[in-house]
Amino acid sequence: MRYTKYLAGMALAVGMLFPGAAALSAQDWRDIRHDNDRIARMRADMNRDQARLNEDIRCGRSGAAARDAQDLARDQRAYNAQVRDVRRDYNGRDWR
């Protein structure tokens, strides 16, 4: 019984935070889960890029640091686009 109340409370919270989320189909939820997994991989990649950039700066490798900074900026743009896509999916809108 207490789990039912807990799950009902969670569903209500999700509905309040993301009004369009209640209308999402199972396919939409799979798409969102896939997108969230991709976001996690992108975050890990950006962390590696940042560590490599920091090491290149520390060691005085300016050419490598510039390439790493460009790679990190490109990954950040892709990450931001992916986060926006997930937000659109939650809200049930497609602005593309």
Image (spheres, helix red, strand yellow):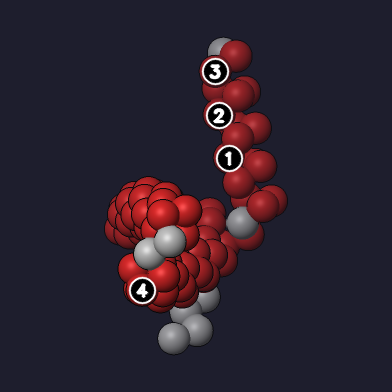
Q: Label 4 belongs to which residue?
A: 63
> Which residue is at a point 50% across and 84% down the rendered structure image?
95
Residue 1 placement (x, y as % from top left): 57, 13
Label 4 Cα crowd, 10 Å radius (few <14 / some 14-19 / many 20+): few
Q: Label 1 belongs to which residue?
A: 11
Earlier in the chain: of badge 2 and badge 4, it is 2
Q: Nearer the viewer, mark 1 or mark 4?
A: 4
Q: Amino acid at mark 2?
A: Leu
Earlier in the chain: of badge 3 and badge 4, it is 3
> Which residue is at a point 54% across and 18% down the rendered structure image?
3
Element on which disc 3 rests: helix
Q: Are marks 3 and 2 in contact (CB under 8 Å)?
A: yes
Residue 35 location, quadrant: bottom left
Q: Amino acid at mark 1?
A: Ala
Q: Nearer the viewer, mark 3 or mark 4?
A: 4
Q: Amino acid at mark 4?
A: Gly
Label 1 Cα crowd, 10 Å radius (few <14 / some 14-19 / many 20+): some
Q: Nearer the viewer, mark 2 or mark 4?
A: 4
Quarter the C terminus occupies: bottom left
Q: Label 3 belongs to which residue?
A: 3
Earlier in the chain: of badge 1 and badge 3, it is 3
Q: Are marks 3 and 4 in contact (CB under 8 Å)?
A: no
> Which residue is at a point 65% across and 41% down the rendered structure image?
12
* Numbered label attached to residue 7: 2
Q: CA distance from mark 1 to mark 4?
A: 51 Å
Element on which disc 4 rests: helix
Seen in the picture, residue 8 relative to 48 is either above or below; the reply is above
Label 3 Cα crowd, 10 Å radius (few <14 / some 14-19 / many 20+): few
Element on which disc 1 rests: helix
Q: Residue furthest front?
A: 60
